Image (cartoon, rainbow, N blue to C red):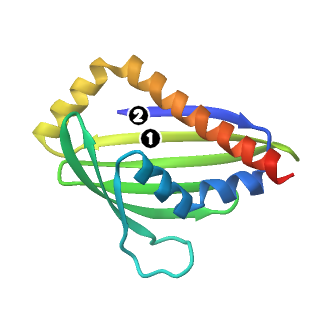
Amino acid sequence: MKFSAREDIEAPIEFVFAQVTDFQALERSALRRGAEVQRVDGNSEPGVGMAWDVSFKLRGKMRELKTELTRLDAPNSVVLSSRSKAMGGHMVVDLVALSRGRTRMSMDLELKPINLSSRLLVQSLKLARGNLTGRYKLRIADFARDIEDRYTRKG
């Protein structure tokens, strides 16, 4: 199952990339939303190999997954791969400079079921695809607006 969203942001690509790769801020944001996030790699600098253990409640059940930064191509793309006992997936963030002060951000999220119970979960998610896609696009739009706001306050 795949979700995609694309937003144009009124900020230079370097600034947008810096915000997308501000992993400490993203960790704090996940914590505020009720997830538990634990950094598990030994890297001192942000880069490929960064990893987190994440747990969160979804559909009334606690889900646990491991997330790893698998590609970092500044300032163009970031790929995070995740896996749990039942599901795998990855998120791809692509950035394209439309002009000196405008950037297009595309975020694709793909979920891949591993076992029968996760296939059933994905099947039930497909039934609510329209609602979930709308919520995903709204969340990405909010994130893009936050980046624009930070850039405006900075300037």
- Placement of the N terminus among the 4 image quadrants: top left
Q: Is residue 16 left or right of residue 133?
A: right
Location of residue 147 (image quadrant) = top right
Residue 76 seen in the current view:
no
Label 1 CA crowd tier, 10 Å (few <14, some 14–19, many 20+): some
Q: Which residue is mark 1?
A: 109
Secondary element at image label 2: strand
Q: Is residue 60 above or below residue 152?
A: above
- Depth check: 135 or 79 in front? 135
Residue 108 at what x, y percent from top left? 50, 40
Label 2 CA crowd tier, 10 Å (few <14, some 14–19, many 20+): some
Q: Is residue 32 left or right of residue 119?
A: right
Going by the numbered disc 2, the residue's amino acid type is Lys
Q: Residue at x 48, y 57 (%)?
A: 28
Residue 76 at what x, y percent from top left? 67, 54
Question: Tags 2 and 1 in contact by the CB under 8 Å rule?
Answer: yes
Residue 11 at what x, y percent from top left? 79, 45
Residue 120 at what x, y percent from top left? 16, 31
Q: Residue at x 18, y 48 (%)?
A: 86
Q: Which residue is mark 2?
A: 2
Q: Is residue 135 left or right of residue 106?
A: left
| Of pointers 2 and 1, the one earlier in the residue sequence | 2
